[in-house]
Amino acid sequence: WSLPSSMAVAHVRAATMEDVLESKDFHFAREEERVMELWDQLDAFHEQEKRTRGMPEYVFYDGPPFATGLPHYGHILAGTIKDVVTRYATTTGHHVVRRFGWDCHGLPVEYEIDQKLGIKSKEDVYEMGIDKYNEECRSIVMRYSKEWEKTIKRVGRWIDFENDYKTLDPTFMESVWWVFQQLFQKGLVYKGFKVMPYSTACCTPLSNFEAGQNYKDVSDPAVMVSFPIVGDPENASFVAWTTTPWTLPSNLALCVNPEFTYVRVKDPAKGNIYVVAEARLSAIPGAVPKKKGKKDAGDAPAGFELLAKVKGSELAGTRYTPLFGYYTYLGTAFRVVADGYVTDDSGTGVVHCAPAFGEDDYRVCLQGGIIEKGGELPNPVDDSGRFTQQVSDFVGRQVKEADKDIIAMLKTMDRLVDSASIVHSYPFCWRSDTPLIYKAVPSWFVRVETIKERLLKNNSETYWVPNFVKEKRFHNWLENAHDWAVSRSRFWGTPIPIWASEDGEEVVCIGSVAELEELSGQKVGDLHRHFVDQITIPSKRGKGELRRVEDVFDCWFESGSMPYAQQHYPFENKEFFESNFPADFIAEGLDQTRGWFYTLMVLSTALFDKPPFKNLICNGLVLAADGKKMSKRLKNYPDPVELIHDIGADALRLYLCNSPVVRAEPLRFQRKGVSDVVKDVFLPWYNAYRFLVQNALRLEAAGLKPFNINDVDLSKVSNVLDRWILISSNSLVEFVRQEMDGYRLYTVMPYLVKFIDSLTNVYVRYNRKRLKGKTDEADCRASLATLYSVIMTLCKVMTPFTPFFVESMFQNLRHCKPYEPESVHFCSFPVATPSTEMEKRIELSVNRMQKVIELARIIRDRHAKPVKTPLRELTVVHPDDDFLSDLVGDLREYVTEEINVRTISSCNDPSKFANVRAEPEWASLGKRLGKDMGRVAKAVKGMGESDISMFESSGSISLEGHVLCTGDIKVVRDFKQPAGTSSEEIDAAGDGDVLVVLDLVPDESLIMAGLAREMVNRIQKMRKAAGLTITDKVDIYHEQLKEGPLDAIISSQIEYLEASLGTSVRPFSAKAADVEPLAVEEHVIGDAIHVKFILTTASKDGIPKATLESEVSNLNMDGH
């Protein structure tokens, strides 16, 4: 493309558009690559940002991904949503800073290095050196950053990679320190023990939302174990059930439900006496007698003998004999406690408690005095998930692998009541894909429970699409939120800025580099562990040196701090941040309701008592076509880079934005779906554009003044379809602006498809003659200017969605408007004007006209009457006189041509052709009327013609004490066959609004006209097949192969044939012998006219002066 500089634009003369390729030769993906070259030439993204400086800020936060893996469809989806919204914000008069962010710390990076270096434990890291380990981590964090940048740019997303933020930057980390210090000073930070999901493969605890990312159905052992009651005269035992036998060596208590009834039962076969919940007795093998069958009925076990019943609350305090002797020195242990968390839907109603390995276990043991806060907590499992020396029988064994040996030992001890297996859903580490365990770990916590009401209040002030994610999923998560463990016993992350004395009594929380330098007297640069761990702070209480605690922040704390840390707040950009917080918009996937959305909300509420954002779009998951998770190993999805190369990024963007995934529902991704977008949206759109360009160029080729959009005042066009498509274009602008302001991306595509269908299959198709100059030059220019204006508006409206394709068209269209900016992305979003009553009438009338044409086609199809067969009369029945006036007036020509009828009649009295009745709209009335629905429905069905007429004119009616309006009642018109006719002669079709009556009786003159129309169609297809262009003139000859009325058709339809073909159709005998044919084909016209058509280069004489008007363009566009 040639690009005049902005300084010279005012002096550039309007030029002619360049010709365009046929749709079969146009490759959308290759054209997108040309557009990318143009954007690079213009530096378009940065230029757009410069041009919008000084405009109101629209603040967008980009959640940081890890660069240790390649981008997938989930990233492309979220990135597309973000790009669409921020592009729209820019075109509507906002300045939008779009910075890419990178999550550089945490488990994903460490796990990669552990795998690379064969690191199995923390001791391996200490032996290697934290400095060397962390630098290994640093070396891979940006491994795939270039691939990310390339893919994201190719998808059409405009975002700043040069001015990106990284969570490893010292400025980012310093702001994270500041955030934590603010929480510390507000009393929202404390240190404690918490039972957390724990990855033994990664040697680290995970947050609850991380643990919820990867559940699998697995088979685990399910054992019942006996616990003899101390001092029981009958040697009775409690029976507890567990699916984690590895926790039994750490058992300290049994828990019962105080409200349940427990039974003491005796096994007659073995003599054992057990205590279990009455509701769970049937779970004990042999406890409940089986129903006797016919065979061996007398041998069926009788079941256990009931000895006594007791309330669970009465069992509290009962002592029992421990399974193992590892912790018998704990005098408070091995007692029964009572708590309502014990259920009767599984197990025995007696729960074994190992407080170091279960959240409820820890809680009830603390409440029951089994353990004390700050006291010993038996935890015989090391960081890698292996038993320590405390469990001498299984020392060094991985806990899950030790299950079988523990069960075997229980059997030899005669404590195993039953051993089975269970398939249940169990959490796996999202990074290593290994089973998690639950383990008590020391951690630094942020108090979330104390600010819960403020969290819920701030959430209520935000706007989400879809709303149910906010009101249900996120609200419920906040309502049940627990204190947040923000520390990790790892190495590669932002160090927790707490320096403490050896006894833990003197604690200093650092909030800045300057503060640390002042207190330590040392210069500070990098803030990672291997730079700050050796820094000490002199005690102010005489306690020697304060040293930093070893933990680092969970990377979710860092990403939740990004609104502040990306701007190095409060050390820089203080005024800008404070005047532009909260953000206008964020977007991520559904899984972030427990991740990034949550951490953002907690920190912004704790710091500023504000929500962190105003508007949020939450997308669903992109799955493989079979509904399974996309898997690189299974290769069950198309490679995104290859798909974009083959089909194009715009098609992928529209496919994603039009799918259920932007409503937080899952999408089964299919390559065919992306291809269908090209077929259903882009090709018709391109063909309308191509039709405009080719017919605009035809003017100059014919020696006329070149097309100039400024020659036509579009506010004064008189043609009804010109006015209609301009009105529809205005409605499109209004609709897209309305939906984008509401962040409903998914509603735009269906409206766009409908609009493009109206543009191509109504406006362009119905105006073929005008657009090709078949009427007169002024009319041709008016229609071309209208089409140009509509396509230009469509380009500007769709810039956020299809940035490549609209740029390609705009660059050619702007030849006619050199004062337009150098890129469509520098243009403002169009502004809709309020519709006048006349415009509303035109829009309604044309929409009804389309319905009339559709209904007439239904009648034709019903009677096997193709459109090529002319019919005598069509009657439209409707009570709206304005519509009927438009139909038999301005719209008449379009209907007669599309339906191929000679005359159109109108009738405003439905009773002449139809029986009118009313039906209730159950969907709209049902919920509103409730029990009154039956009475109202009966009244609606009983409405007479006068009642219906009054309802249609006034728009409302009162029935049974209820006012019913438009939309509550459906008026149905059933066709009434005219007396003395059959349905083969006159038939009708209606949609409840319009009734179309079609005269089907054949007419000889009309049949001749239909055959002539078929001849034109066949000849034009020959032109196309021969590769002839619009301006190639030909002579046409015919040779009749069988007798038939060919000559009669040609003579009776000569004017139509010459007008359509630009020449007469002459007998073969008139062809000069030395003229070589361009095309020769045999055809059957109608059912019996066998003819050969011969096309030759036009001779210089004997050709009618009629302008050559070929239908070739139309054939290329819509096949008619």
Image (cartoon, rainbow, N blue to C red):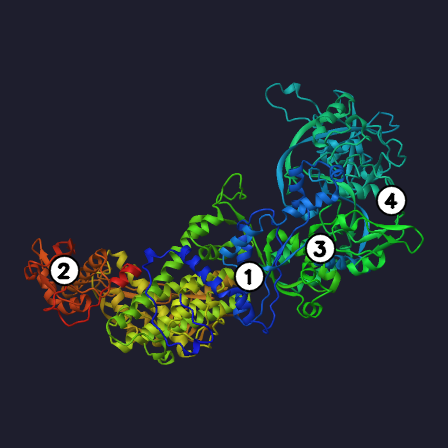
In the rendered structure, which disc, 4 or 3, sits on the residue that comes first in sequence? 4
Q: Secondary structure at mark 2?
A: strand
Which residue in the protein does label 3 denote? 479
Q: Is residue 433 above or below residue 858?
A: above
Viewer-nearest of labels 1 and 4?
Answer: 4
In the rendered structure, which disc, 3 or 1, sits on the residue that comes first in sequence? 3
Which residue in the protein does label 2 denote? 1096
Q: Residues within 10 Å of mark 1 (few under 14, many from 20)?
A: few
User: How much space separates mark 2 and mark 3, taking CA atoms?
Assistant: 82 Å
- Image quadrant containing the C terminus: bottom left
Q: Name the residue type under label 4.
A: Gly
Q: Secondary structure at mark 1?
A: helix
Q: Is residue 1097 left or right of residue 581?
A: left
* Observer-nearest of 546 and 917: 546
User: How much space separates mark 1 and mark 4, taking CA atoms?
Assistant: 61 Å
User: How much space separates mark 2 and mark 4, taking CA atoms?
Assistant: 103 Å
Residue that lies at the very extreme toward the right in this rendered image: 542
In the rendered structure, which disc, 2 or 4, sits on the residue that comes first in sequence? 4
Viewer-nearest of labels 2 and 1?
Answer: 2
In the rendered structure, which disc, 2 or 3, sits on the residue that comes first in sequence? 3
Q: Which mark is residue 374?
A: 4
In the rendered structure, which disc, 2 or 1, sits on the residue that comes first in sequence? 1
Quadrant assignment, res 388:
top right
User: How much space separates mark 3 and mark 1, taking CA atoms?
Assistant: 34 Å
Q: Name the residue type under label 1.
A: Gly
Q: Residues within 10 Å of mark 3 (few under 14, many from 20)?
A: some
Quadrant assignment, res 1006:
bottom left
Viewer-nearest of labels 4 and 3?
Answer: 4
The percent position of residue 676, horizontal first and vertical second, equals: 40, 53
Residue that lies at the very extreme toward the front in this rendered image: 523
Which residue in the protein does label 1 denote? 930
Q: Is residue 170 left or right of residue 323?
A: left
